[in-house]
Image: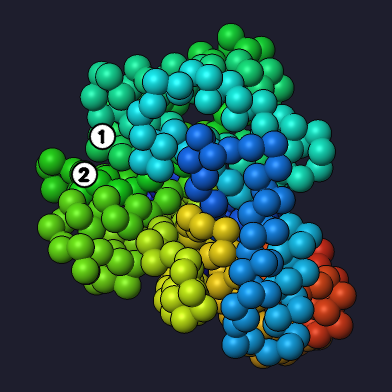
Amino acid sequence: MLLDGPTIASLTARLSEVDRRRAARYPGGRGGRQPVHTCYVPASQIGPSTPREWGEQALAAMTEHGFDLSKDLTERVKAKLAREPVEDLRIDFEDGYGAPSTEDDDARYAAGCLVRWHAEGIAPYSSGLRIKSFDTPALRDRAIRTLDIFLETLRDLPPGFVITFPKVTAAEQVEVFAELLEVLEQRLGWPTGSLTFEIQVETTQSIVDSEGKLAIPAFITAGGQRLVGLHYGTYDYTAAVGLGAAQQNLAHHAADFARHVMQVSAAGTGVRLSDGSSNVLPVGDTAQVLAAWRVHYGLVRRSLEHGFFQGWDMHPAQLVSRYAAVFGYYRESLESDARRLAAYAARANSADSGGVLDEPATAQALSASLLRSVDCGAATAEEITQATGLHLDVLRAYHRRAAS
């Protein structure tokens, strides 16, 4: 040996701090279930049974207009719409709501509805509200007041609660918002860190800052552990870069650029990503509804293929094309993914492998896809276990090991 222990330790000593910073910044995936969508409902339209009503309207649209799906997929989508139509919901006090004089009352009423959804067992897996932006003093004051009223009305924080922070243009806004949440927790007597939020990436300044640097890394630093997601805002962003109305859609290359920046900036941090929405709504006669479903279906599939496993839904009937696209995506690859993971597990456990995972990134991708299919209802745990020969706990272990 040419190098002794003390020499190596001396040469690599300063890398300890690098290791510490990297581990703190890139802890890996957040783990647990990620909803396949976020449904935005204007606060003025919220009622005591909104999640259930969205499912009923989606089922009615599917029954009336039909959709060209296999029998198996049709039954799975209908079962999902009856059992859990909405996985994630934001009560919207921003663009979808406007600025009515009744916002105080609407905040109290909507928060009361959220409490009732949980009491009656119809609440989505996760939910929350979207406040107004911090763009101007007037909007900022209104956003804080609405959030204050809403949280005070809740009294107890429901599980899966998330706040959407829109139109961010500077890291300082994120810092102040995180500090505001800490103060609200203290006043409400809630545990520190219990209030989490997601940032809407819908301004050019949230992609590249005034100094030419990528902006999102600074946002993630400012948000700390409270920041759990980045949501792409289709129409505000494409309008901000100067696209005409006809080109403002999820499939435009300008949208791809923004999403790629989001992916690179958030990779390994535990901050999840969500794609935006389609404004082609499934309303009108059957021909119009089917055309809108085809557009939405294609966009959802495109998002999934680009690594965005969540998106926005703005209308109850979009749940049909959302679940058709999501379920189809996972079921089409289920057999091949399961077969590859089973072969991978066999190699990893063989006598000559030494128990070492030769391709941890492969195990992570395969296990993540199969676990997501169970989370959303595209497949059952029994189907995955039968297909892979592995219990879901083994898949989760592969996922954690690969992400670490």
Confirm whether residue 58 shows in the render: yes
- Name the residue: 25% across, 46% down: 203
Q: Is residue 58 left or right of residue 100?
A: right
Q: Is residue 364 left or right of residue 6?
A: right
Badge 2, how many Cα within 10 Å: few under 14, some, many 20+?
many
**Spatial separation of the CA atoms under disc 2 and disc 1:** 7 Å
Which numbered circle lies on residue 205?
A: 2
Secondary structure at numbered mark 1:
loop
Q: Are marks 2 and 1 in contact (CB under 8 Å)?
A: yes
- Name the residue: 44% across, 65% down: 281
* Residue 60 or residue 268, whichever sits in front: 60
User: Please, is residue 177 above or below residue 289 in the view?
Assistant: above
The amino acid type found where label 2 is placed reads Gln
User: Please, is residue 361 above or below residue 70 in the view?
Assistant: above
* Residue found at the far front of this picture: 285
The amino acid type found where label 1 is placed reads Ala
> Where's residue 92, x and y in %?
47, 38
Secondary structure at numbered mark 2:
helix
Q: Quadrant of residue 279?
A: bottom left
Which numbered circle lies on residue 170?
A: 1
Quadrant of the snapshot with the C terminus: bottom right
